[in-house]
Image (spheres, grey):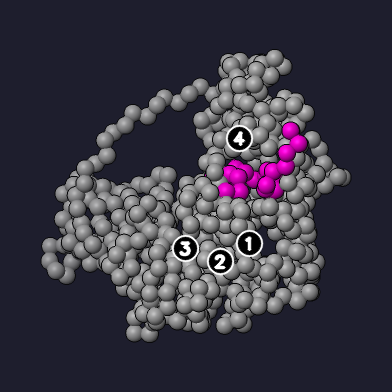
Amino acid sequence: MIRPLLCLCGLLAVGHPLQAGVSLELRHLWEGKPFAIPSGTFVTGSGETIELSRLAYLLSEPRLLSRGNNASSGTWLRRNDWFAYVDASSPGGVSRLELGALPLRNYTILQFQVGLDQKTDETDPAKYPANHPLNPNLNNLHWTPQGGYIFLAMEGHLRNDGGDPGGFAYHLGNSWNRTTISLPLSLDLAGPSIIGIDVHLDRLFDGDEPLQIAANPSTHSRKGDGIARLLKNRLPSAFAVREIRETRPPAPTDSPPPGNLIGTPYRFRLARGFPIPKLPTAPPLTNEGVALGKRLFHDPLLSGTNKQSCSSCHQTAHALSDPSRFSKGASGSRGTRNSMPLFNLAWKDSFFWDGRAPSLRAQAVQPIQSPIEMHDSLPNAIAELKAANYGPLFEAAFGTAEITEARLGIALEQFLLTRTSYNSRFDHAARGKEELTAEEKRGFELFMTEYDPRRGLKGADCFHCHGGALFTDHRFHNNGLRDDDDRGLESVTGRPTDRNRFITPSLRNIALTAPYMHDGRFRTLEEVISHYDSGLHRSPTLDPNLAKHPRDGLGLSEGDKSSLIAFLRTLTDPQFLPSARQEN
């Protein structure tokens, strides 16, 4: 999906008041046939069979050449403050992006960059608004504190004749790999128009020397990497103008008048280096809404027995998670998944291990009604709240004393959105307030280094799924666990390509949130690291960043594992420790 800027100004030229809007429409093809992500199987020029699970990239600096009075003259119209995030998992694999308004002229060349200039690449990514294409929580293309963006992420599976799935992950980054795309066209702009562009992905794999994927399963674009150089050199040939067509301008819509704010605006605090989240505006966070949600979160009236609250399974001492493998419900039943920790939820847009809830307010009311959790009905819970004189609290938060299902979800959402965690020893070290030990630094180095023996790199490769300030990509992955009963995201989407894919939890406070994985099968961090080192179950949906690793594992030494654990313990926020714990 292409995400436009919140305020996208047009490409303007002085002296040409007559203008029309121009859009780019990108679709992705393999051997001339459009596809979307996840893709079907393709055969490359080397004879290898692949499937693509991710294709995402960044565009910047568009410019168009308008024809002058003679063949040798012309004027470039350009934008240096324009960026786009393209994700080929958009419906049908087609993405639309507004360039803005252009003077009514004839245009002969369209150019743009795949990637960013060095200054932009090195700018603090935390400054961008929530919907900005360069916000790392939106694009998941900025994984390391000390590094820049990935300009192109192309990941997938290598299907061998024997059925044993391999993986590949090609990540093109660093300013020297920024690539200019130059497309000849003939655009006589007379009204709103669309420039249709085809992206022929097969051209990146084929050519005079087809890419040998099995021998070169990854690149992270370090200097001198031949695979990164090959991708950069082939990118210009992948883009081609398909068509130019006029379109009707969008019909004007009347924006609803803003509602009156009820209550006192809540001051949401961010730590340095954290991306800006997209907070709800209908209604916005208020002190009164947060206070109501906090009381509801801790109130056992929301359970059928009046003895269990939300906080029973999301305990402060365990970073708002449950130390039991499966939580015990109000009726004594046990669940089938481990309770997830509830912090830094403001940066998420899907909830539960399988992502079945599209918002936090939708998620918050589901456990109340679950027969194996709080085992109540919403009408009964609402009646209990009315009898307990919650009316004045709802009136303070919403303007009237009415208690409804929607308001119950919103109030719980408001409180949960304020549960943030960004004050660990690692954060103090990143801010220069203290220093990590040599072993902790070694663990961080292993954490941030991919496994690529071709380049002499033998790290733990954790950052692809757990990178960035939040230590999660909020995406769904099959992380190599054998589970024939719980199919994860597939149970929501119905797609076999989503089998055994679960959302990535944050590694913040990981030392406090045992047991681990969606089913709590691992009791210790040692077991978790051993799984990723050598315990992966190979299946068709295994994440490519894991599938590219050799079957005999990463070869981490015992010292490496100890260093990793030492680093992971630096992610503990002291607000959850006994010495500083307070009611949350």
Label for residue 53?
3
Circles 1 and 3, Cβ within 8 Å, touching? The answer is: no
- Residue 448: percent from left, percent from top: 64, 68
Q: Residue at x 42, y 59 (%)?
A: 37
The crowd level at tag 4 (other Cα within 10 Å; few <14, some 14-19, many 20+) is some
Camera-side mark, 2 or 3:
2
Q: Residue drawn 69% across and 36% down?
A: 373
Q: What amino acid does circle 4 point to?
A: Gln
Callout 4: SS: helix
| Quadrant housing the C terminus | top right
Q: CA distance from mark 1 to mark 3?
A: 20 Å
Image disc number at residue 482: 1
Spatial separation of the CA atoms under disc 2 and disc 3 = 14 Å
Q: CA distance from mark 4 to mark 2?
A: 31 Å
Q: Is residue 349 magenta?
A: yes
Q: Quadrant of residue 380?
A: top right
Which comes before the other along the chain, label 4 or label 2? 4
Find disc 2 in the rendering and name its residue.
Answer: 539
From the viewer's perspective, is the residue at label 4 or at label 2 nearer? Answer: 2
Q: Which residues are magenta?
A: 330-354
Look at the numbered discs 1 and 2 and tell me whether their residues touch, using CB distance below 8 Å: yes
Q: Residue 366: give its label.
A: 4
